[in-house]
Image (tube, grey):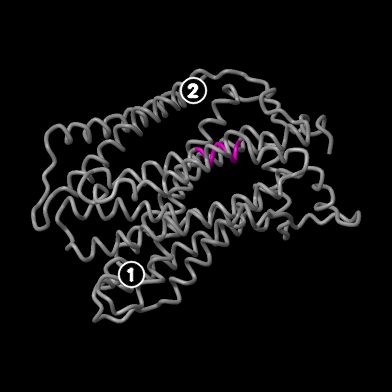
Amino acid sequence: MNSEMLYALRDVAGVPSHPIVFLVLGVLTFALHIAAVHVMLGGTALVLAKAFSRDPMRRRLAAAMTTTAKIAVSVAVVLGVAPLLFVQVTYDPFWYTSNVLSAWWVVGFILLLIAGYMALYFFYSRNHHLDDPQHAVRSGWSLVAALALFLVVGFIMHVLTQQMLSPEKWMEWYAPGGVIDPRGHSLHDYNLWRFGFFIALTAPVTGAWLFAYRRYLHAGHKADAPYLQWVGRLASRMLNVGGVVALVFLGGWMATLPANIAGFATSPIVLLSVALLLLTVALPTLLGQRTLNSSLGYAPFALGAVALIAVAALREVLRYDVLRGVHGYDVFTYPVHMDWYSNVLFFATFALIGGSTLAYFLAVAWKVGHTPKGQIYTPSPAIDRIGTASMWLIGLWIVQFFVVGFIVWAR
């Protein structure tokens, strides 16, 4: 398929802001999304590895990670909407074609994700005393099913992303042997090195999360020293071993790039990603006991988030290079018809409503974590005002939504 046809498949309405805005937002939101996915997968895997032990520390961690994974699923779904919308806006000819070619699996993605969450929640509901070794673990099959389904939906999304990068194969997939097959039953293209890299990142990201979890418990005097030391050792192993495995998969992914863009493997964005991942792995060793005794315990996860932003940027730059260098499609030539209202509304919503609401939740979580066990936390007037302001802002947003809609309808 030539570049003229790809340009013809664009939305004739153009885009409401410069493509760079959508690309940058796509990178940032994907990094947040994939961080939640990694915590979800890592938490579920840890539960599977620790829940069936009679060791009290393993059972305690399994109970904590069950709750963590359950919440991380919701966070991953919510944060996954934005990068999906951004790629639909900027690369609509590629994304929609890939979805049509595997339409059966696109619909199945939603159903399988729902089934995975239900399986995880079913395990959670059946094991409220998971931290007590005297209680037997029930319905372990649902935990296995949840992890398997999460990996399947991740693979489906990987395939959809991979297929959009090969427009020269679309006709072959749609009409194999010259016979049209409109069912969308097949998954046509994948790169196990690429998929393995993003899955392998689960280990170091979850390891960094465990350092933050350990510091959170220590700050509130909610765990004894042996448990905190054990969690720290586990976190270190996950960071070190998982980091090496992830970099091996990254190397395999870069080695399988098309020949005409093979030089991307040594590009600045790849080198930056590798450097940040290595620094994330090394940081707990450099900080030593400060990861336990100070707020620097949150630093590995914070640096890991920065590394994931670099990885997300790597992914986006590679997509641009493949589509432009191999297929002659330049996203920056997309016609721009600036819509100031939607731009202002989006960024105001993101900064004011998102900022105030997130600030309130983080402030409460931070203070609760520093409240000694057995004491009841009461928010200060300042934190109460942040929460009240966020509620008012949400209310005003809803009002303006209907007012603007009514004005447009009336006109």
Tell me where residue 372 appears, x and y as whole percent.
Answer: 11, 53
Residue type beneath disc 2 = Asn
- 2 or 1: tag closer to the N-terminus: 1
Label 1, on which residue? 125
Front-most of 330 and 12?
330
Image-based side of 223 in relation to 313, left or right: left
Q: What element carries label 2?
A: helix
Q: Which residue lies furthest to the left in this view?
A: 375
Q: Give the range drawn in magenta.
A: 310-316
Tell me where residue 35 appears, x and y as whole percent.
Answer: 44, 48
Residue 343, placed above or below residue 250: above
**The quarter of the displayed image where residue 67 is located:** bottom left
Image-based side of 356 in relation to 30, left or right: left
Residue type beneath disc 1 = Ser
Residue 193 drawn in magenta: no
Tell me where residue 318 appears, x and y as whole percent.
Answer: 65, 38
Residue at 59% of width from left, 22% of height from top?
18
Work out which quarter of the rendered image holds the N terminus and state it: top right
Say the numbered circle drawn on residue 315: none
Residue 172, placed above or below residue 18: below
Residue 390, placed above or below residue 73: above
Residue at 62% of width from left, 35% of height from top?
267
**Magenta segment, principal secondary structure?**
helix
Q: Is disc 1 surrounded by few (<14), some (14 to 19) or many (20+) residues within 10 Å?
A: few
CA–CA distance between discs 2 and 1?
A: 42 Å
Q: What element carries label 1?
A: helix
Say the numbered circle drawn on residue 343: 2
Tell me where residue 99 appears, x and y as whole percent.
Answer: 68, 48
**The quarter of the displayed image where residue 321 is located:** top right
